[in-house]
Amino acid sequence: SPAPAMHAVSLVDPTSHYPALMQLVNTKISDPVIAYIVDCVSETVDYGLERADSASSPQTSRGHSRTRPSSHQRFYTFVCTVLSDARVSFPTVLVALAYIARGCPRLRIGIEKYASERVFLGALIIASKYTQDSTLRNVHWAQCTRLFSTRDVCRIEYDFLTVLGWKLAVREEDLLAHREGFLAAALNSSPRTHIRPPMEGLVATRPHTHHRRASSGSVPDLEPSSPQSSEGSVSPPTP
């Protein structure tokens, strides 16, 4: 039988890629990396909520020590849990951050509840499905969150796809945009005030099968700034 067709990108010699990118994708998921992810998502959510101080937060502060509200600490724990239980690789995280940055200008969030969790999870699921030949089903993503139902996860994924305009291709520049930020976060060794679960929790484990999850009605939609939005929205209309 004929060999299966390969995408042109798969035929590119790895040595032709920018060396800094190859170094970046080999980064290990660590405490500073998670702190940087949390800060990136939190800044995007602030923008989506149209908070007045969101534009004044410089990117150079990502991953650095600062006072964090309890919701920020809860989100940090959520990120650790999902990355651990879903066995997420760093390249997938990097693509997810590229999606979050791309969606930021079009993101409008009507309700703050679980906003950071929804943005992060939506981008991560899409990144995993776009970059991996074999990935988790949404029922398993729901188990990994220990928070959302399968129905919630499906809606979160669809809403974030709508925010992205279903345009999922990524370029080297999209990924390298985070290189300096990760380096700065890794160099920051001062203690942080948010929750720091032991890093052995990031060792791959099987998704748990019984968790407390939020009901579907309690999870509002993410909406793009355009008039289009997912059908059946339970959240109030946003501009």
Image (spheres, rainbow, N blue to C red):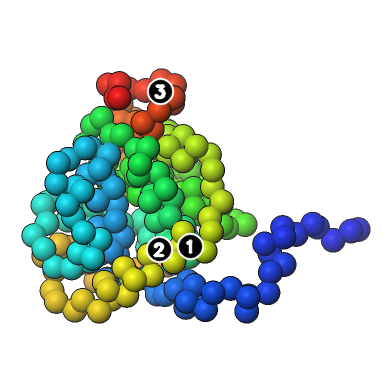
Q: Where residue 35 sits: x, y (%)? A: 25, 64
State which tag comes first along the sequence, 2 or 3. 2
Along the viewing direction, whichever of 146 and 225 lies nearer the viewer: 225
Mark pair 2, 3: CA separation? 29 Å
Which amino acid type is shown beneath numbered disc 2?
A: Ala
Residue farthest toward the right in the current orientation of the protein: 1
Q: Residue at x 89, y 58 (%)?
A: 2
Q: Residues within 10 Å of mark 3 (few under 14, many from 20)?
A: few
| Residue shown at the point (40%, 28%) measured from the top left | 226
Q: Earlier in the sequence, mark 3 or mark 1?
A: 1
Secondary-structure class at tag 3:
loop
Q: Is label 2 in contact with label 3 (beta carbons under 8 Å)?
A: no
Identify whether 162 is placed above or below 236: below
Query: Outermost residue, left direction?
Result: 67
Q: Is residue 96 shown left or right of residue 131? A: left
Secondary structure of the residue carrying tag 1 is helix
Q: Which residue is mark 2?
A: 177
Residue visible at 68% across and 69% down in the picture: 12
In x, y percent, where is residue 53?
14, 46
Residue 207 in sight: no
Identify the residue shown where x is 23% and y is 32%.
111
x and y percent of residue 166 in the render?
53, 39
Q: Amino acid at mark 3?
A: Pro
Q: Is residue 61 left or right of residue 170?
A: left
- CB under 8 Å between callouts 1 and 2? yes
The mark lying in front, picked from 3 and 1, is 1
Q: Which residue is mark 3?
A: 227
Q: Quadrant of residue 16?
A: bottom right
Query: From the image, which quarter does the N terminus lie in?
Result: bottom right
Instruction: Residue under label 1, please give it.
Output: 173
- The local secondary structure at tag 2 comes to loop
Q: Position of residue 90 (x, y in %)?
A: 44, 67
